[in-house]
Image (cartoon, grey):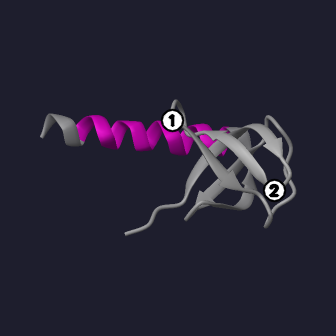
Amino acid sequence: MCLAMPAKILSINGDEAEVDFGGAIRKTNLSMVEAKVGEYVIIHAGFAIQKVDEEEARETLALWNEFLESSEEA
């Protein structure tokens, strides 16, 4: 199963960006979207596939963290 998750762009070098998934820093490819440092993008399979507003990104990350915490308790 693959998930598409929001991430905040921390830095950009050509088509490659360093992004933050709410604490997990990874590299991703930005060739499919036009985005700037500080903006949020949806990442799927290592590629940014669309921009998303900050509020929506934070809500999605909060829900994901709640899910992870509840699955650890089970």
Q: Which residue is mark 2?
A: 15
Q: Which residue is mark 1?
A: 24
The residue sitting at the left extreme is: 74
Q: Residue at x 79, y 67 (%)?
A: 32
Q: Residues within 10 Å of mark 2 (few under 14, many from 20)?
A: few
User: What is the distance, in whole Å, between disc 2 and disc 1 at their CAs?
Assistant: 20 Å
Question: Secondary structure of the magenta portion, mostly?
Answer: helix
Task: Say which element carries label 1.
Answer: loop
The residue at 44%/67% (across/down) is 2
Q: Residue at horizontal 79%, vertical 34%?
A: 38
* Left/right of residue 73 with respect to residue 34 in the rendered view: left
Asked whether residue 14 is drawn in magenta, I would say no
Residue at the image position 82 percent from the left and 37 percent from the top: 37
Residue that extends furthest to the top in the rendered view of this protein: 23
Residue 12 appears at what percent x and percent y?
Answer: 81, 43
Residue 14 in the image: above or below residue 10: below
Compare marks 2 and 1 and give the one earlier in the sequence: 2
Residue 36's place in the image compared with 50, above or below, is above
Question: Which residue type does callout 2 highlight?
Answer: Asp
Q: Residues within 10 Å of mark 1 (few under 14, many from 20)?
A: few
Tell me where residue 48 sits by quadrant: bottom right
Q: Secondary structure at mark 2?
A: loop
Question: In which quadrant of the rendered image does the N terminus lie?
Answer: bottom left
Q: Position of residue 54 (x, y in %)?
A: 71, 39
Q: Between residue 65 and residue 46, name the one nearer to us.
A: 46
Residue 45: give x, y in percent of width and height. 55, 65
In this picture, which residue range is highlighted in magenta?
55-70
Taking the magenta stretch, the answer to whether it contains residue 59 is: yes
